[in-house]
Amino acid sequence: MAPFLLLPFFFSSAQESRESEVKVLAYINATIYPVSSPKIEKGTLLVKGDTILAVGTSEDVKIPVEAEVIDAFGKTIIPGLICTHSHIGSVAGADSSSPIQPEVRVFDSIDVRNTSINKARAGGITTANLMSGSGHLLSGQTIYLKLRKGNIVDDLTIKLADGSLAYGVKMANGTNSIRDSGPFPGTRGKSAALVRQKFIDAQAYLKKREKHQEEKPEEAFERDLALETLADILEGKRTVHHHTHRHDDILTVLRLKEEFGFKVVLHHVSEAWKVADEIAEADVPCSIIFLDSPGGKLEARDFEWKNGAELSKRGVVTAFHTDDPINDSRWFLRNAAVGVRAGMSRQKALEGLTLAGAKMLDLDDSIGSLDPGKQADFVMLSGDPFSIYTRVLETHIEGEKVFDLENPTDRLFAEGGYGAGHNREATGCCFYR
């Protein structure tokens, strides 16, 4: 029996050996914005494997003897950026088969080798909510991805505690989903009516499923993929990410939310400043976009730069997004400076790039701020995050460096043209060292 008594010791030693192989990195002398706490000058960020061990001043953080020390003097470290609304990965737009298609998964149409993902890493984005377009009232399931370096899309997914994928559901109202042909609505009123009826159908589906489980638990229930997704929304398992621009369309979403009790994040909200009090009263978070120009979209003609300030000062959780390719993911950082210029506090603007987005994706327990125990998603900058001259130097996801401006290939993704993978020297005002 003696040999068997050695087994616990053997396994314990093997585990300790594996743990000792996990690299410990100490980034010292950096200006650190944890976001969840005040800025730290001459700070230290201690990372072990994929996890943050400690963050604080050089006096507060004890660096283990086995740690590799990186001197980040003159650099700034912030949490990984979170884009709550993106179309990177060559995600397809709308089709004309149905205005409401909750069973469709964007997960099944993502190309992880698409250069847009590399460009997003170059912009400091570590987590993104990828979704299809807004040409439907309900275009399907979004997917929350960590922009890790992976071979297939499964390598980028985020798993929940129950093993399921982390995702939301994309909805839209306004002109994008109005077509006046085939099964699509021709008016705003008809749009709301179609959505309302579909959720009523889902309520009936839930009751039918519950009755079946009570009366025939041994028999498999006949699934309906569309209604099953809507049932998840009604049960609070999934969040609705709702494209909406005009103030009256925003109010329509709030009415539907009140009627059916689902969790919702309002996206774009060009006219949120007109109904900021109503949004605050409904306690609904907003993901906003700063448009250089509303272009030809009439719904966005009353867009105001003060949107973020008007919402945040009323206590509305406010995040930014790119809607890439509407705004290039490489310039996502500038949203903080634009937000401050338009009246947001520096704290709320930084939260808009990080922690606020994490809350909207229900991932703030693991990402969004630099706190011990959270995943080591962070960005190293050349300077102040609110300066237009600041550049993303490095992007780290779960402790792995996924972008490095010093790497010639990565630099092309940061500075190249539309494809960003060609071997061309970048020119212009913003591409100096």
Image (cartoon, grey):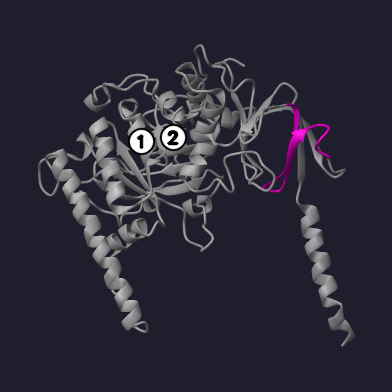
Q: Which residue is drawn at 81% across and 68% down?
A: 12
Q: What element carries label 2?
A: loop
Task: Name the one closer to the observer, 268 or 256.
Answer: 256
Q: Looking at the image, tell me whether mark 2 or mark 1 is earlier in sequence order.
A: 1
Residue 210, given in percent of the width and then of the height, sits at: 33, 73
Quadrant where the image shows the C terminus? top right
Q: Is mark 1 on a helix, strand or loop?
A: helix
Residue reaching furthest bottom?
1
Q: Is residue 159 magenta?
A: no
Marker disc for residue 279: 1
Q: Which amino acid does label 2 sit on?
A: Val
The span picked out in magenta is 41-62
Quadrant hosting residue 135: top left
Tell me: 35 left or right of 8: left
Distance of label 2 from label 1 (alpha carbons): 8 Å
Crowd class of label 1 (few under 14; some 14 to 19; many from 20; radius 10 Å) = many
Q: What residue type is labelled 1?
A: Ile
Task: Name the one closer to the observer, 316 or 5.
Answer: 316
Q: Name the residue under label 2.
A: 316
